[in-house]
Amino acid sequence: MKNKFWTVLFIIAPVFLNAQVSSSGLSNADSFGKTVYGLGLSAGWASGLGISFREHLPTKASLEAIFGIIKTDKLLMSIGGEFQYDLVRGPKSRFFGVSALSYQYSGSGSNEISGPFRFGVGAGGEFQIQNSFYVTAEGLFTFFSDGRVIPLPQLSMHYYFN
């Protein structure tokens, strides 16, 4: 039942996302022509949880690195990355294809996570909240190293600078 819900959500969600943005303001993605950097937070099953650094290359591609670590009675660690390719870009939003890869660790001595390696493929959208502050929502089919495949959401927020 839970997997059917997520499958239906990710099939229907793009219809509602497109309805929220005027299509007249969007065009095919052109390259920025310069490198733009972003620093923020990212949370996702496929790319990991933690502090995020994003680099929009002078082309339509973007790279992102995510790292998070917390030490309490046991160590919790996540390291991952994303590759994004812009499909449509407007003045205050963009839509892109995305792939992500990560490794998750939880334990003290040995990893207690059954599927620590994750890989995801999907799509996302980034939306301007203020001048240089953007929020990103993604939906990825996430492949776990223990054999599970689940469609899952990811969220991030970044502050961009040159």
Image (tube, grey):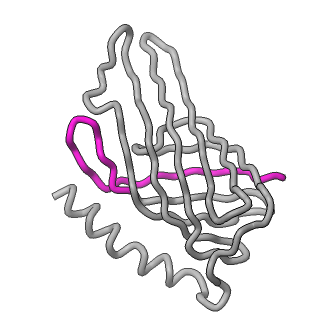
Left or right position of 99 against 141: right
- 148 displayed left or right of 93: left
| 62 in relation to 68, above or below | below
**On screen, 21 above or below 148?**
below
Which quadrant holds the N terminus?
bottom left
Q: Residue at x 75, y 50 (%)?
A: 37
Quadrant position of residue 126 = bottom right
Query: In x, y percent, where is residue 107?
Result: 37, 15
- Looking at the image, the residue that sits furthest to the right is 162
For residue 52, above or below residue 140 = above
Q: Residue at x 58, y 82 (%)?
A: 21
The answer to whether 147 is drawn above or below residue 58 in the figure is above
Residue 27 horizontal/vertical position (percent) = 64, 84
Identify which residue is drawn at 51% across, 15% down: 71
Residue 97, position as x, y percentages in the image: 49, 64
Q: Is residue 154 magenta?
A: yes
Place residue 51 in its image quadrant: top right
Q: Residue at horizontal 68%, vertical 50%?
A: 158
Q: Is residue 152 left or right of residue 65?
A: left
Q: What's the magenta region?
A: 140-162
